Amino acid sequence: MLDALKTKKKLWFAAALLCVSQHAYSDASPQGLENSGGLLTTTETGELSFTMPYAALTAKLGKKFIKGHEQFNELWVLAPAPGIWGLGPTFNEANCAGCHPNNSRARPVADGATVENGSVIKLGYRRLDGVVLPSHPWYGDQLQNRAAENRVPIEGGATVTYEVSIFEYPDKTTVALKRPLIDIRNLNFGDINDATLTSMRIAPQVIGLGLLEWVPDASLLNIVAEQKEGGLSGRPNYVIDLETEDVVIGRFGWKASQPNLKQQTASAFHSDIGATTFFFSEKNCPEVQTLSLIHI
Ligand code: HEC
């Protein structure tokens, strides 16, 4: 029963997030690659190409695909506004597509611009004993730059400038490397100090992830073994599956910190949109924020 359920869920997410594994190729593509994804190849070449479903989806899976697509685009609202409730109290965007437009990667933040529209600032905290926590005691794991208007203040905002340095390879080829310098401002719950760690992240494209979820653990472990033979040291990141409480291989998100698309999605709902789920049932509002605010 559990297996059947798991398979069903996997299919759901595969259908919801699966589009094309290969970007459609134009006539200018290298020869032989025109149909390299087989039935997964789409002839769509415009900005919607990452939103195309697998051409051979069954009617049932097609419906699930459409449902997933709708939910990905759904603009969540603050109760009691008409619509689907769940947004906030603090958040970064009101829908998934707000950061992953048409299932694609967000645009990088321009030099000197505000961090928004698909880029976020993750926060960590170094305790006095040196231990690094994956979350700031007052601001949580991500700086939320938007909030329920007239009800709670935003946590704060950030702008970024880039420091460029030139890196030279042994063959004298050079590349320009850009290091983001993050300037956090307009903080509403107290200043942050040097113990705060910041990291800017950009929303990646989300095509084909259902297929990646289907790759068996054994295949990943084989790659690790092969890499070892080749003198490389890639290794799986083991994380907790919150549903089963098992320690499993991480697959999605930064440094593969989430075990499956379901948990990754629940985490996005919580950190990016502010919506709770049975995975993350507490409001995304560290205690210091709830204590200093009127109830919402
Ligand atoms: C505020 C912007 C934002 C919103 C809204 C958002 N995401 Fe993301 N998403 C990101 C960023 C940034 C990352 C990569 C950072 C990381 O993993 O730490 C990411 C990563 C992901 C990944 C992992 C991709 C991979 O290759 O491992 C998936 C899947 C994903 N998001 C799905 C969703 C879904 C589903 C929603 C809606 C419930 C959503 N996202 C809403 C910004 C956003």
Image (cartoon, grey):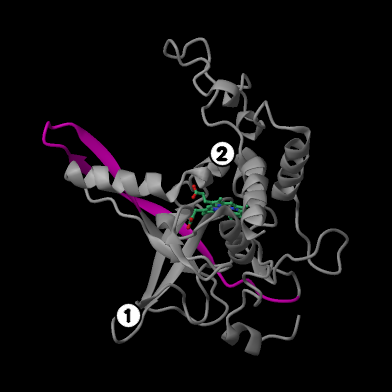
Label 2, residues with CA under 10 Å away: few <14, some 14-19, many ≥20: many
Which of the pair 260/161 is nearer the observer?
A: 260
Horizontally, is 207 left or right of 57 in the view?
Answer: left
Residue sitting at x 41%, y 66% = 198
Which stretch did the figure color magenta?
151-179
Hey, what amino acid is under mark 2? Ile
Q: Residue most toward the right?
A: 82
Task: Mark 1: give few (<14), some (14-19) or many (20+) Cα within 10 Å.
Answer: few
In the rendered structure, does residue 155 fall within the stretch colored magenta? Answer: yes
Is residue 37 among the parts visible in the rendering?
A: yes
Which residue shows up at 51% across the image and 27% down it? 22
Question: Tag 1, which secondary structure?
Answer: loop
In this rendered view, identify the residue nearer to me: 266 or 151: 266
293 to 250, vertically: above or below: below
Q: Which residue is mark 1?
A: 131
Decide if residue 107 is on the left or right side of residue 131. Answer: right
The majority secondary structure of the magenta stretch comes to strand
